[in-house]
Amino acid sequence: MRTNDPTLIAFATALLRGEDIDFFEMDVHMSVLEGSIGILPRRIMVRDRDHFRAAAVLRDNDIAVAG
């Protein structure tokens, strides 16, 4: 998933943690380059083997999933 919304990132990571799905947040420190204005999206990545479950959990909670 990719978003500029920090509350959506927090919600999605809480859902994934609750399902014991490992994830990695990418682009977290990009605010240093953009000046903390939030224009660069952050991403949450999961392993290929966990993608189906992670996508289902996020979709069930009305979070759009890429790929």
Image (cartoon, rainbow, N blue to C red):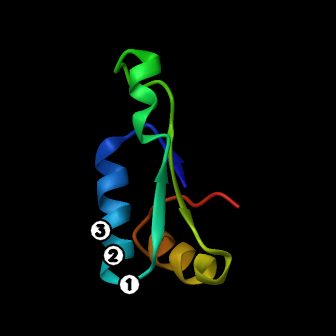
Residue 25, how many percent across, how many down?
45, 54
- Location of residue 31 with respect to 18 vertically, above or below: above
Residue occupying image coordinates x 46% and y 75%: 22
What residue would you read off at disc 3?
14
> For numbered disc 2, what is the local secondary structure?
helix
Viewer-proximal residue among 43 and 59: 43
Amino acid type at image mark 2: Arg
Dot 2 alpha-carbon crowd within 10 angstroms: few under 14, some 14 to 19, many 20 or more: few
| N-term-proximal mark, 1 vs 3 | 3
Helix, strand or loop for disc 3: helix
The residue at which mark 1 appears reads as 20
Furthest residue in direction right, as rendered: 67
Q: Is residue 11 above or below residue 16?
A: above
Discs 3, 2 touching: Cβ within 8 Å: yes
What label sits on residue 12 in the rendered view?
A: none
The part of the image, by quadrant, that contains residue 16 is: bottom left
Name the residue: 65% across, 83% down: 49
x and y percentages locating residue 34 in the rendered image = 45, 18
| Mark 3 closeness class: few <14, some 14–19, many ≥20 residues within 10 Å | few
Tell me what residue is drawn at x 56 percent, y 73 percent. Answer: 55
Q: Which residue is mark 2?
A: 17
